[in-house]
Image: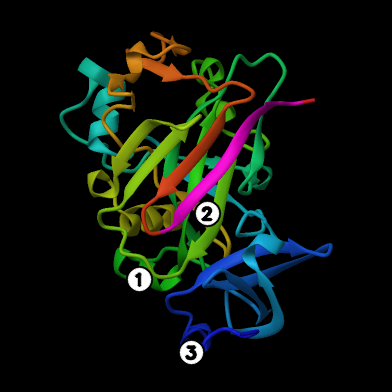
Amino acid sequence: MNAISQQAARDVRSGAGLTIVRYEKDGRTDYGILEKGRVTSIKGDIFGDFTAGDRHFPLDEVVLLAPIEPGKVYGVGMNSHGYRQYRMGAEYPEADPAEPPVFEKSGSAITGPHSHLLVQEGMTGISGSPELAVIMKRRASGITEDEVNDYILGYSASFDAMYPEVAIRDMLAAKDFPTSCPLGPWIKTSLDTSDLEVSLSVNGKVYHQGFTRDFIYDIPRVVSFLSSRHVLEPGDVVLMGAMGKEAHVDGKSADFVDRFTGLGELRPVAYPKYQPGDRLVVRVQGVGELPFSVSRAD
């Protein structure tokens, strides 16, 4: 069948329950709808009105790109009770900060599935966390928490990369560098985000696992807060922060895994350092898998 189903066509018109991809085929980049292993092109604006197009391809015949054209990226630091307590140890405060601790990445940070996260010269490896990503649909400024859902296009999987040794002196610089935000593999426009499992596997072994129910600041709180400080534009990405009390490999705490490097000046526990050649996969329940590799920059 060289067309999406009638139900999917209705979903296109309503904007509900879709899997939106951004892909390359025959040298052409386009947005499409993924259904039952087939991609159908989109006519129109994914942030406004669009309909199903007349180009149809099996998924394995297209190259998936980052599901959104690079815009601004915002993130929340350590946005879970378990992860924050794990990282801060005895320094964990009794009360949560009144405002979410946020940071920014530039558009050049965004890269797609099966891409390469590049380790720059002078860096000894890359750390980071698997995260749920929120994709904005409408321009948002000063919106309330109750209004947030109307401004969201959908959700994706992401990895918030950082250089641990740079973070000791400059956390913002540690997080914002080219390829530091793998994103994908697509956008789910309808998703119950209240209790999703988010995990990271490295070379086939689970290193990090958490659940969105552990968020300190939920999605409406974070997006509303960001819109009070910035004007959020269609296609902007909000990374919801690291989750999970501990990372484990084969049942052992991450503190005892080879190649984990302690940085006592930064945190009383170790950050992992992923090396060129490592293959990472972020999994977000209800979204899918985001595979990418760590490579040395030329």
- In the picture, the disc for residue 237 is 2
Q: Which residue is drawn at 55% across and 55% down?
A: 185
Q: In which quarter of the image is the N terminus?
A: bottom right
Image side of residue 94 versus residue 19, left or right: left
Task: Residue under label 1, please give it.
Answer: 147
Task: Residue under label 3, please give it.
Answer: 10
Give the image location of residue 246, x and y in percent.
Answer: 29, 27
Main secondary structure along the magenta-highlighted residues: strand
Q: Residue at x 56, y 26 (%)?
A: 174
10 Å crowding of disc 1: few (<14), some (14-19), many (20+) = some
| Dot 2 amino acid type | Val
Who comes first in sequence, dot 2 or dot 3? Answer: 3
Which coloring applies here? rainbow
Q: How far apart are labels 2 and 3 at the CA level?
A: 27 Å
Give the image location of residue 111, x and y in percent.
Answer: 64, 46
Which span of residues is magenta-colored?
A: 287-297
Instruction: Name the front one of labels 1 and 2.
Output: 2
Who comes first in sequence, dot 3 or dot 1? Answer: 3
Who comes first in sequence, dot 1 or dot 2? Answer: 1
Instruction: Using the rendered view, name the quadrant where residue 20 is placed.
Output: bottom right
